[in-house]
Amino acid sequence: MTPVLLGWKLYEITGSKLSIGILGLSEVIPAVLLALPAGVTVDKSNKQRLISICMALYFLLMMGLLFVTSQWFTSEISTPGKTSSQWIIQWLIYGLVFCTGAIRAYSSPAINAFLAQLVPQESLVRAVSINSMTWLLAAVTGPGLAGLLLGYTNITIAFSITCTCIFIAVILFQLIKPKPVSWQAGKTTTVEGMIEGLQFVFHKNQRALLSAISVDMFAVLFGGVVGILPVFAVDILKIGPEKLGWLYAATYLGNFIAIALLISKPLKNKQGKTLLYMVGGFGICILVFAISKNFWLSFAALFVSGLFDGVSVIIRGTIVQLFVPDEMRGRVSSVNSIFVNSSNELGQFESGVTAAAMGTVPSAIFGGCMTLLVAVVTWIKVPTLRKFEY
């Protein structure tokens, strides 16, 4: 729900495409800067306890966003110079989102590493798929609900529901028992642990792993049109927040259906080729979305892009889980987060900057073309990934 709420609020008070791009950048900066030391911390720590702390801090930050976006706070700081009050709200939002990025640097690799401790090795592929589906279920319903709440109530009620959901999650997570820590005390320093994580990912024997996360990073970076959906909604498609929410949900709905199909019928071979086909298809969908002026065509383009992306998510996630030893999962997941997880926010920033410089539609066309180029270049230059199977 949160990206819809904050994207709409920022574009409403600023009218600036760049402001939405800065929103993504404010989250990705701490997530990238802290990723490597956070990975060492994850491997050293009781992951259940660390995730619980992260979730509790995230709840407090969401309460902060509820406060600064509320009508009461807006009216309290309003002055005869309207621009100054907008500036205060805008940068308070950026500051709070910056803090969520710092938390995510720890929570994302911790959750990825913890998952592998909860199920036996032979069930890991299915567990990755089911875990992705539960996240996607929220990613589909959340934006749709956020749009409806913005359209029929207000942002304060929407954020109140968000905070309630996170609070419930904190309570439910305590039902999971802590698991043993694989890290051997005194084995390495934090810096040495960071170097080990980087060496593992960049080792010549891990070319398939490195190539898989790299191609996904560049595809999402250039094809991150979702980051500026509020601009398309207001300026191109002429729709309100209710339909904006469903545009956000369209990609995740495609993800959900693709992953559901892969749980029942897993890919048996040629996973590397399939990954590159999916990235190319994703780029074509972005091009269709860029030239569309019809809500339903735009929805369909994003939905199909989600189908392609869902397949690539499962292939990449399985590669990361299957080929990384337990004592390295936190650090490798942190390196993975730099490449993949942060590419969403970097893509949002890239989209905001190019939209401000080129215009909204040309920036999306540029992103789609670059995504196709990434797929073609990787196919030609990285035969290891093209031939990869698991």
Image (tube, rainbow, N blue to C red):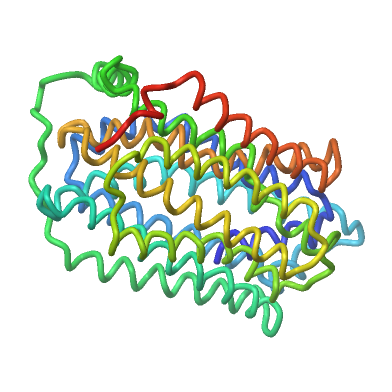
Does residue 125 appear to the left or right of 308 in the view shown?
Answer: left
Task: Examine the image and state in which quarter residue 45 appears.
Answer: top left
The residue shown at (75%, 37%) is 366
Q: 118 or 179: which is nearer to us?
A: 118
Q: 60 or 40: which is nearer to us?
A: 40
The residue shown at (68%, 37%) is 350
Residue 386: x and y in percent read 40, 29
Q: Is residue 215 above or below residue 227?
A: above
Q: Is residue 85 above or below residue 326?
A: below
Residue 47: x and y in percent read 21, 47
Q: Is residue 352 above or below residue 10?
A: above
Task: Examine the image and state in which quarter residue 12 appears.
Answer: bottom right
Does residue 94 appear to the left or right of 80 in the view shown?
Answer: left
The residue shown at (56%, 60%) is 251
Query: Is any atom of residue 10 visible in this view?
Result: yes
Does residue 173 appear to the left or right of 286 in the view shown?
Answer: left
Query: Is any atom of residue 92 visible in this view?
Result: no
- Quadrant where the image shows the C terminus: top left
The residue shown at (50%, 51%) is 308
The furthest residue to the bottom:
152
Residue 279: x and y in percent read 53, 41
Q: Is residue 248 above or below residue 358?
A: below
Count of residue discs: 0
Q: 346 or 190: which is nearer to us?
A: 346
Residue 309: x and y in percent read 49, 50
- Quadrant where the image shows the N terminus: bottom right
Does residue 225 appear to the left or right of 44 in the view shown?
Answer: right
